[in-house]
Amino acid sequence: MSDPMRDRIALVTGASRGFGAAAAEELAAQGYHIVALARTVGALEELDDRIQAAGGSTTLVPLDICDEEGLKRLCLSIHERWGKLDLWLHSAIFAGPLSPAGHVPLSDWDKTLAVNIRATQRLITMVDPLLKAGKGAAILPVDDKAGMKFFASYGAAKAAQKAIWDSWAAESVNTGPKVLTIAPKAMPTALRARFHPGEDRDALTPCRDEAARLLAEF
């Protein structure tokens, strides 16, 4: 007899570290089987070790989120194995070095757009039917840096990403899936350390505590 909790499937994109990893662990503790996607194999394996030690289960997907054919294969595999998704947490992000608006390297602009905007839209296209099949939900952590000094590329990309997400949410009100945004408190992530060097990290909210707070209802 199947365990209905273990039948719940959560895709976490950007699962190797920071809030994504903490969210994957929290969802696993809630009984979800975690499909964990990130580029860094070692970090994914460490996540798997922690989740298994706590009694959970994972499927590891070492994949660049800009690899559209790889994403298609992943979503096809999810469909063939489970026929649905119950939850998608999209925590994958690229942030280039902080720079004045007129001095952002074109390579950083290109990668920012590819990871934060194009990959988000392509994933929505692929994941939407899986979430509808599972009557599931999609969650995007938001971080508003628009208009702040030196955040031109990151702030613009996150604003555009949220605009795409909000449109999907409005379009899905009557049909599903449930599309949500969450706003985590400041956490001691590697990304924040780059944005705020020298900050007192002890004053920040641990990633796992914030994941537990924000994901308590799922």
Image: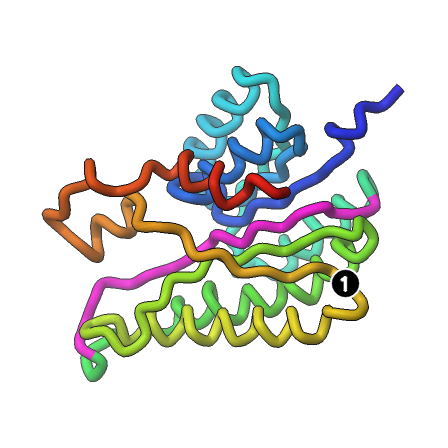
Q: Residue at x 79, y 52 (%)?
A: 135
Q: Amino acid at mark 1?
A: Gly
Position of 70 relative to 55 (above/below): below
Q: Quadrant of residue 58?
A: top right
Q: Residue at x 53, y 26 (%)?
A: 48
Is residue 216 or residue 168 the one in the foreground?
216
Q: Quadrant of residue 42?
A: top left
Q: Position of residue 183 (x, y in %)?
A: 43, 57
Left or right: where 209 falls relative to 74: left
Left or right: where 90 falls relative to 144: right
Left or right: where 78 falls relative to 17: right
**Residue 107 appears in view:** no
Position of 10 relative to 170 (above/below): above
Decide: few, some or many residues near mark 1? Use Cα within 10 Å; few <14, some 14-19, many ≥20.
many
Confirm whether the magenta stretch covers residue 79: no
Considering the whole magenta stretch, tell me its main secondary structure. Answer: loop
Position of 129 relative to 100 (above/below): above
Quadrant the N terminus occupies: top right
Q: Position of residue 66 (x, y in %)?
A: 52, 60
Q: Which residues are magenta?
A: 83-100
Q: Position of residue 123 (x, y in %)?
A: 63, 61
Q: Which residue is mark 1?
A: 176
Q: Position of residue 149 (x, y in %)?
A: 19, 74
Confirm whether the magenta stretch covers residue 92: yes
